Amino acid sequence: MEINMQIQAKKILVNGVELNYIEQGKGDPVIFVHGSLNDFRAWGFQIEPFSKRYHVIAYSRRYHHPNTWVGEGRDYSAVLHAEDLAALINGLKLGKAHIVASSYGAYTSLLLASRHPKLIRSLVLGEPPLFPWLLNIPGGDTLLAAFITNAWEPARQAFQRGDLEQGVRLFINGVLGEGAFEKLPQPVLSSLMDNALEMKAETSAPNFFPLFSCEDVRKIKAPTLLLKGELSPQMFHLIIDELERCFPNKERAVIPGASHSMHTGNPQVYNETVLAFLAKH
């Protein structure tokens, strides 16, 4: 899920907080937006190949490693992160950017595209966790209830009692599949634990899942690539299916042999797929 990179991190002040980021390459800007329990290191398999064609920026969202915390994290929300991302694009004077996003970073990017459409050249969305949508999708309510009961709520309780590793384990197994945590190599586990406190904030934030409807999606005009992992939990497949029905200007692809963290589960196919999409836009 994450590998070390030897690129010197930079900092930018946005909305009262410093965000760490790395950049490489020249050309049209491509911004990588990571998911939960991750940071800019999540894109280690993408930085080099994408920077051969583009000006690549990968940043750590607010509350994620190695950023300094400002506040307690209860304001953690896709809206907050979308406004931070807009400020980062403007602060770096990037103009319109391609946005390549994973999981909660894709949720964030949906809000960005809705609120700041002039900043978006194209969108690549890997399984945004629009969990409230599952309540209105046949079979989705059962899958959501199982995820809340078996992963989200036990993880929240583990974080609250200070058992950070158990909280991370429960969440990872919930979004990648049972037993996934135990199969991760030690460097990946260490980087996940670097972000354990932000996951604690996520599971206790009252506005973690801001309202976002199919009607909101229909207003997004930017060309969009919807990605799902072949091995991802079924709830993500249902959400991608629903997003496909809502988006006016979209393509869709499946990353074979990969689960929710598809950009690390099968980086070769992921990179080929995304680069081919970006080349058209």
Image (cartoon, rainbow, N blue to C red):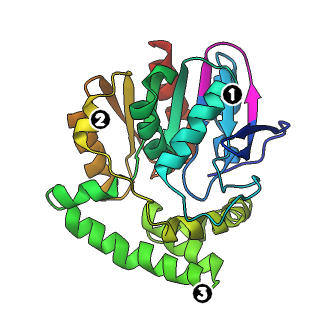
Amino acid identity at mark 2: Val
Q: Position of residue 75 (x, y in %)?
A: 54, 59
**Residue 215 at x, y = what percent?**
22, 37
Q: Give the magenta range.
A: 22-30
> Mark 2 or 3 closer to N-term?
3
Residue at the disc numbered 3: 161
Q: Amino acid at mark 1?
A: Gly
Left or right of 221, for residue 7:
right
CB of mark 2 within 8 Å of CB of mark 3?
no
Spot occupied by residue 227 in the image (x, y as percentages of width and height): 39, 38
Residue type (three-letter) at the residue carrying disc 3: Arg
Look at the picture and state if 248 lies above or below 106.
above
Dot 3 or dot 1, earlier in sequence:
1
Q: Badge 1 is on which residue?
A: 91
Asked if residue 82 lies left or right of residue 254, the reply is right
* Residue 8 visible in image: yes
Write down the residue under mark 2.
217
